[in-house]
Amino acid sequence: MASGTITVTEADYLRIIIHGTTAFELLRTALEFELFEHLEAAEGMDIEQVAKAIGVEPQPARILLLGLASLRLLEKEGDTYVNSEMARRKLLRASPRFLGPLVDIQADIINQAMGDFSESMRQNTNVGLRHIQGPGTTLYERLTAHPELQEVFYRNMGDASKKAFAQILDRYDFSGVRHVIDIGGGDGTNSIELARRYPQLEVTVFDQESVTQIAAQRTEDAELSKRMHFRPGDLFTDPLPEGADAVMFFHIFEIWSLERNTQLLRKCYDALPPGGVCLVYNFVSNDEGTGSMSGGLVSPYFLTLASGEGMTYAPRDMDKAIRDAGFSRVERYDDLGFSHSLVVGHK
């Protein structure tokens, strides 16, 4: 079996789908008990040792270990359970590829809404939003009434952005840019990293007020603070900040319909001077509409909970929306890792 590949039978593949909630809870529970760390520190444990380490009786420990081993997250050597290589890479908190923030957002925000997927399809709106009370008609607005959930949400977004944004910095040269507006910049992860990489660059984070406050609190470096700006506002109703020659439209395209994205990109076009650029960077599906699996599994979230109208679009959808917004020359960068593409429009 090749490294990074897991082979299962057709029957087991369907079992994982049908019992998906249980599979998720096995993983979430293991993370809650810090089981992977306990196993790694001890270089493996038997059932009795695991029960003692996580503070439960042997029978529940046995059930958890059986489930995790069946999912290939643990392996067994004699009577001892050890972490699989996959668990070591992605489920230990010390790992740079730790997936804990993604598990948290699924557990605390997304999963309870997904039972409303079929009704959201019928009504063509985000019926699942009913599980989160508060103002507005999108998840992002509702989260402003729940600071603890907002923190969970932006911790995951920041973690995902940090992992994916390095791909852009390796492929796109910002040295000719003076001032970037980071539209919907969230907790400022991308902006902070960009400003660190390019010491001549100014960056303005444009997002909801409660979100820009999170971003401002993360900017502790005094020199960096001089070049980081935070402008609260509504992307649809408020004007964009002036004086920028580039706009980053990152992880926004997937939220909205193609028509609304074209409208927003036209607003970006109007805010830019001649020669300005708009960089649209997003989680994508393939152009054929057959995958990836991550794209297929994430898309229902946008319909059911986030906005009621978005999905994981193909790069060609991004390309067309940028052209329809008025940009005269378009560059496309595929295969950036983490199922992302970058499409750049030049004014």
Image (spheres, rainbow, N blue to C red):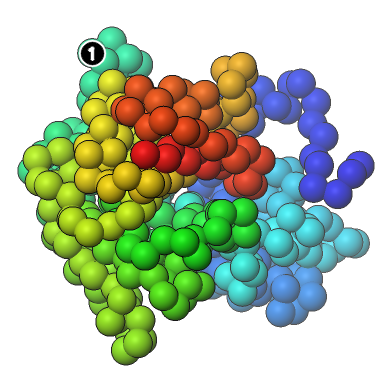
Residue linked to disc 1: 123
Q: Amino acid at mark 1?
A: Gln
Q: Nearer the viewer, residue 224 or 286?
A: 224
* Element type at mark 1: helix
Q: Is residue 102 in view from this perspective?
A: yes
Q: Position of residue 318 (x, y in %)?
A: 45, 29
- Residue drawn at the location 82% of the way across and 34% of the way down: 7
Number of labelled discs? 1
Query: Is residue 57 visible to us here?
Result: no
Q: Residue, x 9% and y 40% (percent of image)?
A: 237
The answer to which quarter of the image holds residue 149 is bottom left
Q: For residue 280, which quarter of the picture?
A: top left
Q: Residue at x 35, y 81 (%)?
A: 224
The quadrant the N terminus occupies is top right
Quarter of the image with the C terminus in it: top left
In this view, 45 is above or below 271: below
Tell me if residue 183 comes above or below residue 334 in the rendering: below
Residue drawn 79% across the image and 31% down it: 8
- Pinpoint residue 100: horizontal percent, then vertical percent: 51, 60
Q: Is residue 30 left or right of residue 88?
A: left
Residue 178 x %, y %: 37, 65
- The location of residue 101, given as percent across then percent down, is 46, 59
Vertical relation: 122 (above or below) 211: above
Single out the residue that lies furthest toward the bottom: 222
Horizontally, residue 311 falls left or right of residue 5, namely left
| Camera-side residue of 78 and 279 | 279
Q: Nearer the viewer, residue 39 or 237?
A: 237
Circle 1 crowding by C-alpha within 10 Å: few under 14, some 14–19, many from 20 = few
Q: Is residue 320 left or right of residue 68?
A: left
Identity of the residue furthest to the front in this view: 274
